[in-house]
Image (cartoon, rainbow, N blue to C red):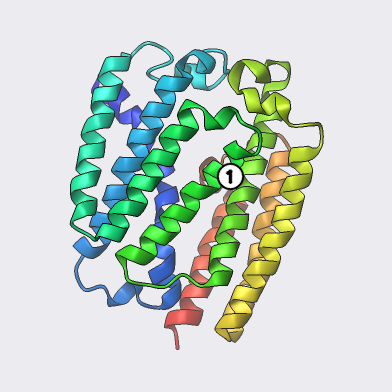
Amino acid sequence: MLFNLFKLLRVRQWLKNLMLFFPPFLAGTLFSLTHALQIFIPFSAFCFASSSTYIVNDVFDRKNDRHHPDKCTRPIASGKISVVTALLFASILVICSVVLAWNISVTFFGLMMAYVAASIAYSAKLKDIVLVDIFCISAGFLLRLQAGGAAFNVAISEWLFLSVFLLSIFLSTGKRFAEKQHLGNEAHNHRKALVAYPQGFLEGAMYMTGGSVLVTYTMYVISRQSSVLLYSVPLCCFGLLRYILRVQSGKGGDPTESLIRDVPLLIVGVAWVSMVGWGIYGR
């Protein structure tokens, strides 16, 4: 029971919540935080909140997941955890996240609750609506970014906002394209929106937004007027192309799994953090 409850948390997906630290990291204020709780509490609040939404999503998707070759083993879909138990666990997680978020700031609390509401709406209905499903996923990343700014009192620049927005659309279309490739004729049994996307649309959208990410990130770097940061643009380009290669090769498009399992992507990610960190903090 405990192991299956732990699986419901989807701990690997907590990597997405590192987006909270982008604002202070890029603003050069991350290491000025003197108390560990200043970092731990916002991150924990979003981890609890996101895990609760994953559980709700699994409840809504339990019938469709039984038709999926990989997701059929999830605790709720396989019947190892009952719906009642799962929803009770999700409620406990939400309460924990609310208590933590309320003690940070009203703005952070509002952004986190907006994330929870958007995620539940996505699970209940919006994931079946073409394009809306992709923009809902993007909204989750943007709300994390804004919540990070609110938690650490950092203003989000226009170019950073656009870069994260377009990157999230890029990753979402890549994930949907990979799912459509993987499921084939069984796609309609798993996700209604997949069969509504015309042939070539998701692939084209992935290319378009990938190029746009490179442009907006370059503009963000130029606005920082740092020669070291400028050299991170080739790393960004390599990372985008590596993700496209992974998707086109049929290796999956889940951003978290791609980062963990794809060694070149992981190396580029670490190199990007190191180079940007040196450009901002090494002066």
What amino acid type is highlighted by mark number 1? Phe
The residue carrying pointer 1 sits among few (fewer than 14), some (14 to 19) or many (20 or more) residues within 10 Å by Cα, namely: some
Q: In the rendered view, does 35 fall on the left or right side of 86?
A: left
Q: Which residue is mark 1?
A: 135
Q: Which residue extends farthest right?
A: 200
Q: Secondary structure at mark 1?
A: helix
Q: Tell me which residue sits at (54%, 32%) in the image.
A: 126
Residue 50 or 184: which is nearer the viewer?
Answer: 50
In the figure, 175 relative to 146: above or below? Answer: above
Q: Quadrant of the C terminus?
A: bottom left
Residue 194 picture quarter: top right
Residue 59 or 6: which is nearer the viewer?
Answer: 59
Residue 160 in picture, x, y percent from top left: 54, 68
In the figure, 135 relative to 220: above or below? Answer: above
Residue 32 picture quarter: bottom left
Residue 83 in picture, x, y percent from top left: 32, 16
Regarding residue 251, the answer to whether it shows in the image is no
Residue 25 in picture, x, y percent from top left: 41, 70
Q: In the rendered view, does 76 fall on the left or right side of 65?
A: left
In the figure, 62 relative to 201: above or below? Answer: above
Q: Tell me which residue sits at (66%, 42%) in the image.
A: 173
Regarding residue 233, the answer to whether it shows in the image is yes
Q: Quadrant of the N terminus?
A: top left
Residue 194 or 279: which is nearer the viewer?
Answer: 194
